[in-house]
Image: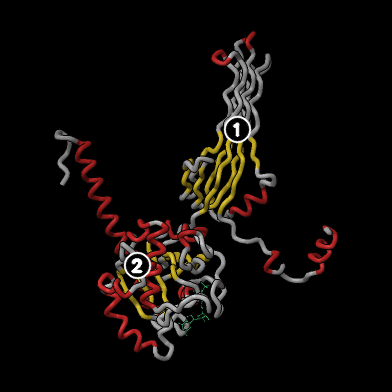
Amino acid sequence: MVQIFKFLLKSTKGPPRAHFRPSFLDTLRLTVRGGHGGNGLPKYGGVGGQGGCVYFVAKEGVTLRKLAQSVKDKRVVASGGEDSSKVCIFGRRGVDQRLEVPIGVQVYDEQHKLLGDLNEPDATCIAAGGGVGGCVGNNFIGRPGDSRTVNLDLKLIADVGLVGFPNAGKSTLLKAISNAKPKIAAYPFTTIRPQIGTIEYSDLRCISVADLPGLIEGAHANFGMGHKFLKHIERTRLLLFMVDIFGFQLSQQHPHRDCLTNIYALNKELELYDASLLEKPCVLLVNKMDQEGAQDIWTNLKPCLNHLESQLAQCPEELRPTQVIKFERILPISAKNLGRVAKVKSQLRETLDKLAEQHFVADGEHLREELQQRVGVRGPKIT
Ligand SMILES: Nc1nc2c(ncn2[C@@H]2O[C@H](COP(=O)(O)OP(=O)(O)OP(=O)(O)O)[C@@H](O)[C@H]2O)c(=O)[nH]1
């Protein structure tokens, strides 16, 4: 059987077929163990070397798949410390195991306790410490290192997260405004893994946008692509909602929902998953405005969008959110015909810059207060 597979793989020319291509990996489970401490030498008071530790370092350009391939049996063990000897009274420390992970990885233990949040380049987290070397305190017998199973959970870091039901035109927009080349097709769930594109402005400012696979009702409870991708919007600074002006129907068995109901449904999904997401600044794009009849729908829809709360009665009860989103901006666009796409770029930038400014001022005031407290009455006057 293996031979047949090998033969088939060899005989295919060009890139491997989609189902042979490695897929996106955003979680990985590893068993890690620190090295055993070396034994001491009681006769000479010699101390054994400490065992090496296992630690993670965040690096750019690394993927969890690469890491999974390099750690074949999903077990990482650091080497033990050297025993104390007559020639080397202090045993050498064991060699550490350094594992590179992508930026944005969170390390959890089995009890789901967060061990480390590696969201900056070169951030490190010790997953398993090495055992103490043998010395007077432990009768010169080296101790075993920590041993645990850790879960690595990658949450993408992007400035903007695109949220919408399948087929809304998210990938089309990402392709139009950024350097990304996502797959686009007229059927739902074309996007099956998150894509990140970078928008470049003439003054070299860059904004990253994450296109996530389309949500469906019940995504918060892990339906469709579910949680697996909703988690990626946790670390974005701005949520960019996209809806089809004509609404969306998942399949013949599902009801057709108009644009307004879809906005409530997206709102409800996020609320059920994590209500704090709704505190992020949100921008709404109403897509496919190039199609016939879109303008008429838009004329009726526009006043409702500015007062989503007052229109809640129109929404079916099961989709009614408790906390209604307040959109910073609402833009009717046509991602396909590039209509108003330039405006999306400029508005995204303006919103993010405004946000950064607010944070800067808030942080500045906090720092000023802290400094005033520290300097006290005898220090220089801070105005
Ligand atoms: N007429 C029109 N069609 C559009 C527009 N934007 C996207 N489409 C079409 O809508 C379909 C879905 O577009 P995608 O960009 O793949 O939608 P998506 O939201 O990424 O879909 P998923 O991958 O399922 O999440 C494609 O056939 C696009 O050509 C638009 O502005 N006008």
Residue bearing the label numbered 2:
320
The residue that appears at 48% across and 63% down in the rendered structure is: 219
Colour logic: secondary structure
The residue that appears at 34% across and 89% down in the rendered structure is: 296
| Crowdedness near tag 2: few (<14), some (14–19) or many (≥20) residues, C-alpha within 10 Å | some
- In the drawing, does residue 320 fall left or right of residue 249? left
Residue bearing the label numbered 1:
34
Mark 2 secondary-structure assignment: loop
Tell me residue 290's x, y (percent): 42, 87
Circle count: 2
Camera-side residue: 18 or 88?
A: 18
Camera-side residue: 180 or 142?
A: 142
Tell me residue 241's x, y (percent): 40, 70
Q: CA distance from mark 2 to mark 1?
A: 51 Å
| Crowdedness near tag 1: few (<14), some (14–19) or many (≥20) residues, C-alpha within 10 Å | many
Tell me residue 273's x, y (percent): 42, 58
Tell me residue 217's x, y (percent): 46, 67
Quarter occupied by residue 209: bottom left
The correct choice, above or below, for 191 with respect to 133 in the image is below
The residue that appears at 27% across and 69% down in the rendered structure is: 309
Q: Nearer the viewer, mark 2 or mark 1?
A: 2
The correct choice, above or below, for 20 with respect to 298 in the image is above
